[in-house]
Amino acid sequence: MAAELEIVCIGNELLIGKVVNTNASWIGKKATDLGIKVKRVTVCADDLQEIASVIREALSRKPKFVITTGGLGPTFDDKTLQGISIALQKKWVVNVEAFRMVQNKYVEYVKSRNIETPDMTEPRVKMATFPEGTKPLFNPVGTAPGMQADIENTVLFALPGVPKEMEAIFELSVVPLLRQASENGGFYQKSIYADNIMESILAPLIDKVMQDNCGVYIKSHPKGMENQPHMELHFSILEKNPDRAEALLREAVAQMVQLIRENGGKIYPEKHQTDV
Amino acid sequence: MAAELEIVCIGNELLIGKVVNTNASWIGKKATDLGIKVKRVTVCADDLQEIASVIREALSRKPKFVITTGGLGPTFDDKTLQGISIALQKKWVVNVEAFRMVQNKYVEYVKSRNIETPDMTEPRVKMATFPEGTKPLFNPVGTAPGMQADIENTVLFALPGVPKEMEAIFELSVVPLLRQASENGGFYQKSIYADNIMESILAPLIDKVMQDNCGVYIKSHPKGMENQPHMELHFSILEKNPDRAEALLREAVAQMVQLIRENGGKIYPEKHQTDV
């Protein structure tokens, strides 16, 4: 069984629809490609008790990984690490290694601007204040370090909300652990596009092809309307052997193409102009 | 206190990062503008037990509204209404009104294509199979009706995943209830943009302005890097009286502008070219 991941995105801007949650889809895609099963995404507000609840609930479901995004910065509404402290029932304390990381950043910043040595003010120290016993993760792009906590069978990562910073720490510190946990499994996928066949006609054909091709998952994505149907059919499989994955997908696609044609549908191997 | 809403988005394509969750941000923005507080967004797989769990958990937090998206179509992986039946411990039965709605759609479709009377096949009947005692919502754009369930103090809506269909049912059947619950409250917002001031310098200024301007919430959105800072400052307030909202925002913005200038920052009233 594939190792499971839950994603927790923290930020009012996501709830009020000011920002579209591309962090969740970016992480979802990366983790899926590495053979990890993304189980759930939860978005909550910049609220200490909400953050603590959401983290506690995620951990109670015992996924192999939990990744949070957002709330690591210097302002009052950056509450993720304090929320995690509450969830883990650990003290929220200045982490020496994180303190050095943050301090080094400001030394760099002021050097390039020819101003005096930076004070480690309260908002700056806050970025280095961690749940006791957890590990800071170097941020190659921005200021606030990420965090890693090893809790029984779950590894909990806290990453920044700014996409470039999140992605950089993810590649550097998260990918190696996901890769190790995936046991060399991989996610393989292929899409075909069908016109002129209603989704309600497709439904039993999909059932049949899935039954005949064990392990292949087929999902229909309607792009038009039921009466002017334009459908993406997305085939996917989680499989260790790339050749076997390729062969299984090829067989399932071939059977589906034949069934769709028998039912009056047209097939396009690629997206085409009627695609919305 | 503003009425609360939880959004539950159902679909593997969201978890694997194939599709970005624009439904959640669209609903989040609409509901926020109507004066509703969006409390949480949860994304889960097309899995019956997962859907039932997520719905049960959302209802247990007793928000005024829960809105689900996705999983109302005719294929095997459309499981939302059956999942809701499990969560509500109600039978999953053919709803006469929904059956007529779906049937009428197919009568229309075949009319325009000059083919014989449509059979109400199993996948089509499935779109009319509802938790017992719930109400179908007319879909002006697509085939599958939405659903409304009135449960103690919560109204639960199930909307389709296809954005155009979701938006149409939302406008028609959800907006009136949200508007009624918001007690004429509204969400007002304003952004300013600041350069040349680090977020760690801004942090205490934000604290001060929020303390001095009760009800105004200020969130910084870093767009550049800490050492080349470019910041959006987003001011918002939930308030019944639009004039009062406008005045409170104006005051808070004016104080913030002054503080930023005193600290060497530059202010732009609008987004400008260095905006990422």
Image: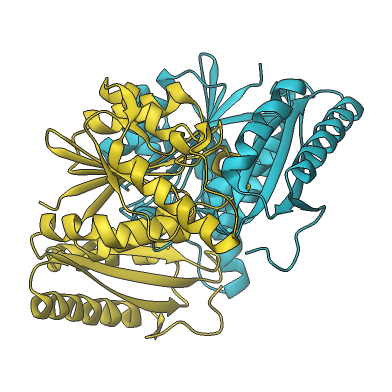
Chain colours: A cyan, B yellow
| Picture residue at 57% right of the left edge, 21% below the top | A64
In the rendered structure, the answer to whether residue B259 lies left or right of residue A95 reads: left
Q: Give the position of the C terminus of chain A as an image quadrant.
A: bottom right
Is residue A67 depicted above or below A70 in this figure?
above
Pick the residue in front: A30 or B105: B105
Q: Give the position of the N terminus of chain A as an image quadrant.
A: top right
Is residue A236 depicted above or below B180 in this figure?
above
In the rendered structure, the answer to whether residue B67 lies left or right of residue A102 reads: left
Is residue B171 depicted above or below A32 in this figure?
below
Pick the residue in front: B47 or A267: A267
Please tell me in which quadrant of the rendered image residue A203 appears. top right
Camera sees residue B20? yes
Pick the residue in front: B31 or A30: B31
Work out which residue is located at the far top of the displayed protein and give it.
Answer: A152
| Residue A180 on image: x %, y % | 73, 24
In the rendered structure, the answer to whether residue A48 lies left or right of residue A150 reads: left
Work out which residue is located at the far front of the displayed protein and give it.
Answer: B116
Please tell me in which quadrant of the rendered image residue B72 appears. top left
| Picture residue at 21% right of the left edge, 56% below the top | B36
